[in-house]
Image (spheres, helix red, strand yellow):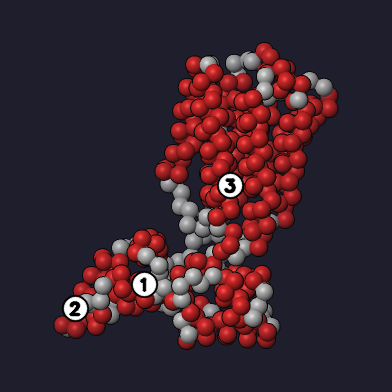
Amino acid sequence: MSPIEAGVRGGGIAILLLLALFAWRDARRFLAARYFVPFMLSGIGYLIESAPGLMMIEPAWLVPLRFLSCLSPALFQLWAWAAFDDTFKPSPIVWLPTAAMAGLTAWAMIAHQWFPWRIVQSAALLLVCVGVWQVLSGRGVDLVEGRRRMRLTLAITVGLVIAGLTIYSAVTSPALRLQNGLVTAGIVLVLALLSAVFHLGFTVPPDLVTVPARIEAPPSAAMTAPVAIDPEERALLDRLRRLMDDERIYREEGLGIASLATRLGLPEYRLRRLINQRLGHRNFNSFVNGYRLAETIAALSDPSQAQVPILTIALDAGFQSIGPFNRAFKAQTGMTPSDFRRERLEQAASRAAE
C-alpha cells in the first residue's frame, strides 16, 4: 500500500470516527444519530478490511471488521429510515433487515463460496434501493429545508456509492481491487468529508426532533405567533388559519404544498419555512392530518354522531381511505377509532347520568 493510499484511508477513518463520536454525543436528542453511529463504524470497517496489505494476509482480527463492513447497506437503509421518516419509531422490528443481512454475511463468510456472496451482494443492492427510495419518497412533504437538501445530495450519493462499490466487488477480481484501492478509498474519503460538511451545517432545533404530541384540540390553537414575528408573517399566518379553520381546505382531495402555496400566493419554499419555523411542523402531511384528526376526534366524541360510520367521518375530514386514517389516528391517540369512540361516548353517558 502506497503512502498516499495509507494517508487517504487514515484520513477517512479519522473523519468517520469523529462523525461517529459526534453522533454518539447527540444520540439522546436526535433519533437518527443512534443509527448513524453503526453506519459510520461500518465505513471504518470497510476502509480497514479493504486495505491491500490486509486483504492478502487476512489476519483473524480482520474478520469482525469485514463482517461490519458488509452490513453497511443495511445500516444505510436503517439510518435513512430514521433520518427522513418522521413516523419512524425505534423498536426491535426496525433491525430485522440488518439482522437478515448479518445472517447472510455470516453464511457467506463461513461457506466462503461464490453463491453465498452473490446472495449477500444482491441483498445489499436491494437494501440500498430501499434506502434511496426512503430518502426520495418524502421529499415533497418535507418542511425542514436542510433535510430537503440533504435528501438529494448526501443520502442519495452515499447510497449510490455503496451500490457502486458492491457491484464493483462483484464483477472484478481481487487483483484488480488491489490495484484500484486508492480510488475506492478516495471515494469513501470524499463521502466522509461531505458528511462532515452536512453535520456541521445542518442542525435541527431540539424541540422539533420528536414526533408531535397527541392531538386533543384543533391545531389552530397552536397558531400563536412567536415573539419575534414581523407583520408580513403574522398576516400570512392569519390567511393560513382562515384557509384551514374557516374554509377547511384540508378536506380537499389531493391537497398538497404546491396547491396551498398557490392559494396563499406564496412560493413553496416560503410556505415550507412558515409552517416549519413558525408552527413547528416537520412534515406537511402531519400538518394537514392534524386538522383532519382534530375534526374526527370531535366527531367521534359527539353523541349526536354516534350512528355515523367511522369511514364516513374519516372521508369527510379529508382522509382518502380507512387504512391511513386508522394508522394516523392510533399514532396520535394511542387507540383505534372504534375504541376511542366507545370510551368517549361512555364518558359522555356517565356525565349525563350524574
Residue bearing the label numbered 1: 315
Residue bearing the label numbered 3: 132
Q: Residue at x 69, y 29 (%)?
A: 47
Three-letter residue code for mark 3: Val
Of marks 2 and 1, which one's residue comes earlier in the chain? 1
Q: Residue at x 30, y 69 (%)?
A: 311
Three-letter residue code for mark 2: Ser
Residue bearing the label numbered 2: 350
Residue 197 vertical placement versus 127 (above, below): below
Instruction: Identify which residue, 64 or 227, lies in the foreground.
Output: 64
Residue 79 appears at what percent x and percent y? 56, 46
Residue 258 quadrant: bottom right
Instruction: Identify which residue, 280 or 259, lies in the foreground.
Output: 259
Characterize the local packing of mark 2: few (<14), some (14-19) or many (20 or more) Cα atoms within 10 angstroms.
few
Q: Residue at x 53, y 79 (%)?
A: 223
Of marks 3 and 2, which one's residue comes earlier in the chain? 3
Residue 28 vertical placement versus 263 (above, below): above
Q: Could you tell me how far apart the alpha carbons at marks 1 and 3 are, in whole angstroms? A: 32 Å
* Left or right, 275 with reference to 304: right
* Left or right, 47 with reference to 112: right
The quarter of the image holding the N terminus is top right
Residue 305 quadrant: bottom left
